[in-house]
Image (spheres, rainbow, N blue to C red):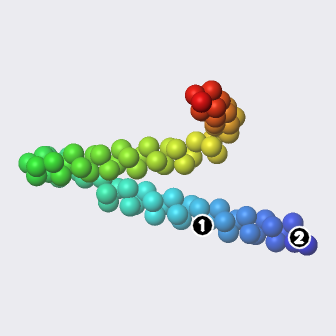
Amino acid sequence: MATKAELEAELAQLRAELAARDIREKARAEEATPSTEEALQEEGNDGVEAQTDWETDIGEILADLEAFPHKQPLMFALGAFAVGYLIGRAK
């Protein structure tokens, strides 16, 4: 069985890893986000910006859907129940 000190050390290590991951994700997001000058230049590229916006929106929606059951489990369960009920009543 692990001691309290071992568990606290592991917790500190995991927190450091999460902080490092958050920093890497923020750096990637900043690299992926075009500046205003780049955005103005892309407007003339025949829909390249529209495709990028579409992909960004879809990515954000999917990220929200993945996080929803963890953030609001009761709402998720009620929604699943309601959908199941509606499908069951449709027959």
Q: Which mark is residue 17?
A: 1
- Extreme left residue here? 44
Any mark on residue 5, and which?
A: none
User: What type is the residue that disc 2 sits on?
Assistant: Thr
Q: CA distance from mark 2 to mark 1?
A: 21 Å
Residue 86 image offset from top left, x and y in percent: 60, 28
Instruction: Tell me the quarter of the picture where residue 90 sits.
Output: top right
The answer, for residue 87, to whether it is visible in the render is yes
Q: Residue at x 20, y 48 (%)?
A: 49
Farthest residue, direction front: 91
Q: Within 10 angstroms of label 2, few (less than 14), some, or many (20 or more) residues?
A: few
In which image quadrant can residue 4 be found? bottom right
Residue 69 lies, in percent from the top left, at 62, 43
Q: Can you say which quadrant of the picture contains the C terminus?
A: top right
Most foreground residue, 53 or 9? 53
Point out which mark residue 3 bears.
2
Q: Secondary structure at mark 1?
A: helix
Residue lying at 44% horizontally and 43% vertically, measured from the top left:
61
Q: Is residue 82 visible?
A: no
Query: What residue sits 15% from the left and 48% below the top?
Result: 47
Give the quarter of the figure containing the N terminus.
bottom right
Residue drawn at point x = 32 percent, y = 60 percent: 31
Secondary structure of the residue carrying tag 2 is loop
Q: Is residue 36 above or below residue 15?
A: above
User: Which is more N-terminal, label 1 or label 2?
Assistant: 2
- Sort mark 1 into few (<14), some (14-19) or many (20+) by Cα contacts within 10 Å: few
Amino acid on which disc 1 is placed: Glu
Percent from the top left, x then y, of residue 13?
A: 67, 69
Vertical relation: 4 (above or below) 50: below
Left-right relation of 7 to 53: right
On the image, the x and y values in percent for residue 6 come to 82, 71
